[in-house]
Image (cartoon, helix red, strand yellow):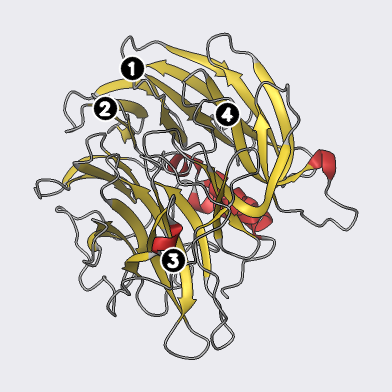
């Protein structure tokens, strides 16, 4: 079984935030890549696909006994999580209705399968899952991306992408990054290519996922109509016409942000950062095709951007460098109205990560805890009145902590909020109940009521968890 990396978060906080945040979901863990100069046309990745044919499926699971059949039209409201056994499960928010999604298997040649990073489809019917399975040679493994039917796991897993031989993933503990198209019909996957990272497009069929761009670092977002993919690679932002096949086009350049973000409303405007010739930078909003670009606010340093669900407001984390500033956090949170150009500061204190609630009323805030510094304080901000309600203090699991480093990308694909916006799901150890005297991290999946009326409850043992979109 591919081992998890112990004590990863302190290393990330000491190194990866500084090294990767300005750069991104960066270099494959097995190599040190250099960023090539921006070419005049969109690059391609030759021979970056699978080196062996994809397996059509893995062994089928027996029909689970503790599972009720889901009705597609009804709310799903389930949590997908990675168990301590490196298998994927889904569960109801109250801890009932457990489903095992990935099959357990007898270890072969000392290695067993390990599955991680489940990614819900927007229609909440399917999951994309990264997996490591035994390779053809002793003590080797293959890394694949699988498609699973959440309501009917007995159908088995379908491989939709396979890494090249020898790949160990894109980051410690992260084999791939996958993000569904909004129509749930295809997926973009960041994986290891021949020499560097590459973005692959899978139509979820039996054909190998096709590479469209290579290099590192890499961030991406889908247009709301699923026709375009925007890729921020190194400093340049490229737009790919996935539906029509037109040539890729550059929309701008900046290293002062990580992930671009497309609003998921009917208009589907794109928000990103551009650098001006005088050295200044600004958050801008454009139409999906890159036209009618409007400046929202200037940003002096590293910035994170998220659209509210209404497609009108932006949450902007802005870094203001100065003596005594926390280099790991954003110094201020802004809410910008893309229609009126009104920008207001709603929070001025170091913020590590943030995520809009599905109803647009709240923003989930993660701040570094003073002691221990590997823990985080979680709060919710009421966007209308500016009030902040503290929820819990928690030491995250290593994988969950890594996700926070890249939260502006993961917020587009891995939801922490319940569909009704009343609860969140976290993975780690609540400080109120630990850590133990031996500093052991108790890995639990926690459901937190944001009103504070109900106590936090542990619903499973595991190290990553994400809520279904509906």
Is 217 on the left-hand or right-hand side of 438?
Answer: left
Q: Nearer the viewer, residue 231 or 72?
A: 72
Give the mark nearer the N terminus: 4 vs 3.
3
Secondary element under disc 3, as helix, strand or loop, is: loop
Q: Nearer the viewer, residue 394 or 87?
A: 87
Q: Residue at x 77, y 54 (%)?
A: 441
What number is the disc on residue 338?
A: 1
- Discs 1, 3 touching: Cβ within 8 Å: no
Is 288 on the left-hand or right-hand side of 28?
Answer: left
Give the mark nearer the N terminus: 4 vs 1.
1
Q: Position of residue 340 (x, y in %)?
A: 33, 9
Give the mark nearer the N terminus: 1 vs 2.
2
Give the mark nearer the N terminus: 1 vs 3.
3
Q: Which residue is mark 4?
A: 364
Residue at the bottom extreme, as displayed: 138
Q: Which residue is mark 2?
A: 269
Q: Residue at x 56, y 57 (%)?
A: 65
Q: CA distance from mark 1 to mark 2?
A: 10 Å
Q: Which residue is mark 3?
A: 28
Q: Nearer the viewer, residue 332 or 162?
A: 162
Residue 4: name its quadrant: bottom right
Using the image, determine if residue 354 lies above or below residue 372.
above
- Discs 1, 2 touching: Cβ within 8 Å: yes
| Numbered disc in front, either 4 or 3 | 4
């Amino acid at each position: 079984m591919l081992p998890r990396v112990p004590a990863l978060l302190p290393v990330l906080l000491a190194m990866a935030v500084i090294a990767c945040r300005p750069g991104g979901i960066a270099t494959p863990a097995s190599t040190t890549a250099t960023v090539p100069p921006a070419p005049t046309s969109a690059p391609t990745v030759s021979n970056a696909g699978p080196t062996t044919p994809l397996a059509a499926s893995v062994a089928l699971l027996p029909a689970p006994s503790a599972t009720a059949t889901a009705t597609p039209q009804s709310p799903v409201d389930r949590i997908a999580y990675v168990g301590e056994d490196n298998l994927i499960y889904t569960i109801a928010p109250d801890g009932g209705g457990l489903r095992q999604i990935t099959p357990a298997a007898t270890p072969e040649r000392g290695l067993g399968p390990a599955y991680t990073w489940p990614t819900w489809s927007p229609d909440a019917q399917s999951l994309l899952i990264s997996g490591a399975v035994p390779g053809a040679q002793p003590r080797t493994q293959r890394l694949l991306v699988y498609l699973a039917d959440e309501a009917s796991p007995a159908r088995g897993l379908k491989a939709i992408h396979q890494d090249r031989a020898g790949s160990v993933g894109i980051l410690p503990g992260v084999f791939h990054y996958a993000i569904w198209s909004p129509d749930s019909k295809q997926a973009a996957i960041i994986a290891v290519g021949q020499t560097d990272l590459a973005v692959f497009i899978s139509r979820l069929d039996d054909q190998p996922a096709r590479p469209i761009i290579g290099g590192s670092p890499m961030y991406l977002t889908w247009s709301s109509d699923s026709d375009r993919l925007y890729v921020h690679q190194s400093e340049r932002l490229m737009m790919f016409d996935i539906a029509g096949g037109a040539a890729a086009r550059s929309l701008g350049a900046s290293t002062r942000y990580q992930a671009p973000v497309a609003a998921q409303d009917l208009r589907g405007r794109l928000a990103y950062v551009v650098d001006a010739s005088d050295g200044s930078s600004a958050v801008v909003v454009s139409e999906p095709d890159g036209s009618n670009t409007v400046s929202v606010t200037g940003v002096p340093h590293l910035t994170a951007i998220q659209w509210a669900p209404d497609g009108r407001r932006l949450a902007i984390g802005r870094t203001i460098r100065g003596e005594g500033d926390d280099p790991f956090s954003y110094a201020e949170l802004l809410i910008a109205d893309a229609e009126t150009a009104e920008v207001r500061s709603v929070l001025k204190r170091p913020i590590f990560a943030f995520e809009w609630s599905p109803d647009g009323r709240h923003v989930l805030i993660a701040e570094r805890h003073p002691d221990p510094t590997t823990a985080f304080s979680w709060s919710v901000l009421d966007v209308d009145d500016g009030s902040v309600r503290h929820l819990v203090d928690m030491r995250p699991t290593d994988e969950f902590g890594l996700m926070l480093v890249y939260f502006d990308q993961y917020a587009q694909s891995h939801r922490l909020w319940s569909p009704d916006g009343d609860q969140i799901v976290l993975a780690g150890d609540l400080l109120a109940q630990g850590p133990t005297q031996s500093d052991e991290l108790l890995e639990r999946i926690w459901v937190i009521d944001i009103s504070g009326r109900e106590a936090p409850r542990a619903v499973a043992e595991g190290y990553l968890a994400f809520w279904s979109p509906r």
